[in-house]
Amino acid sequence: MRLVDQGRVDLDRPVVSYLPRFTGGRKGEVTVRMLLDHTSGLRSYVQFFRLAPTRDSAIALLYAEPLRRPPGKSAEYSDLNFLLLGLLVDRIAGEPLDRFAAREVFTPVGMSRTMFTPPRSLYESVVPTGVWHGHPSRGVVNDQNAVRFGEVAGHAGAFSTGTDLARYARLWLSEGTVGDRRVFEAATMRRFLQPTASSGNRLLGWERRDPPGKEPVAAGTLFTDSTYGHTGWTGTELWLDPVRDVFLIFLTNRAYDPRVGRSISELRAVRARLADATVRAVPGACSDRIQPSC
């Protein structure tokens, strides 16, 4: 989004124009927008960490991965899309993703405790991400593909806090301002919240809340249809409702301890209850003027 703001990236240009190694089959039709809304046609996951011994060899396999669906036709979440976006930022910015993100996003927004690869001096304040040889593992991303990519990757690896993510949520609800200072252009941010005919509930880097159904919905029943956000494999989530002017941050790790059976189903129910409780707890969010009512 920063690179789009600066005119250095065009959402509708082919990815290959930025990453010349992204070739083969119909890859020339894949645009930056398709990576962001997951309509590229790439499959959702590949165990690069098992197939490649180094970062360079993992990147080579990523570029060689064929499309599994026609580009631009339907949305399916894919880590590969965001791995490629991370490489695109590296190339266009001329510096590693972590440095660019720190200078262009984290620092301007005031996210002083958000970073890739936290130093050992902070490990005591970092929640464990897993267990290694019987001991809690801190400060290392639990996604093994991200580890293979050097712990700095487009799809995983950033550590943060509830307070910093609250600042990020307020940035979005204010359409790009922090206090009285503009950080991102409002028009650019609105572009990232516009779905396409083929993207389903996917926005650019975000997803819309699912409609209520038989199974509990992560965003519950009280957030409005304007709600957008994202969930994470370990259980984390961030939802923003611009109509109710409410955001929800949930940081947890179902992969650490305790481990339970059917953790995804259990987590889905927890998320739904938490979302509804959040809306009810915020003064004014349940106003009769806002539908659905509480």
Image (cartoon, rainbow, N blue to C red):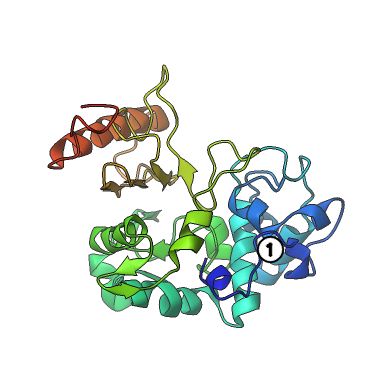
Left or right of residue 109, residue 46 in this image: right
Is residue 125 among the parts visible in the rendering?
yes
**Quadrant in which the C terminus appears:** top left
| Residue 118, above or below 173 | below
| Residue 135, above or below 237 | below
Residue at 15% in and 42% down? 282
Q: How many circles with numbers are drawn on the protein?
A: 1
| Residue 86, above or below 280 | below
Which residue in the structure is indicated by mark 1? 58
> Looking at the image, which is closer to me, 194 or 229?
194
Residue 20 location, x and y as percent? 79, 70
Q: Amino acid at mark 1?
A: Ala
> Looking at the image, which is closer to me, 172 or 252?
172
Residue at 39% in and 27% down? 265
Left or right of residue 241, residue 58 in this image: right
The outermost residue toward the right is: 25
Left or right of residue 29, residue 217 in this image: left
Secondary structure at badge 1 equals: helix
Residue 150 location, x and y as percent? 55, 70
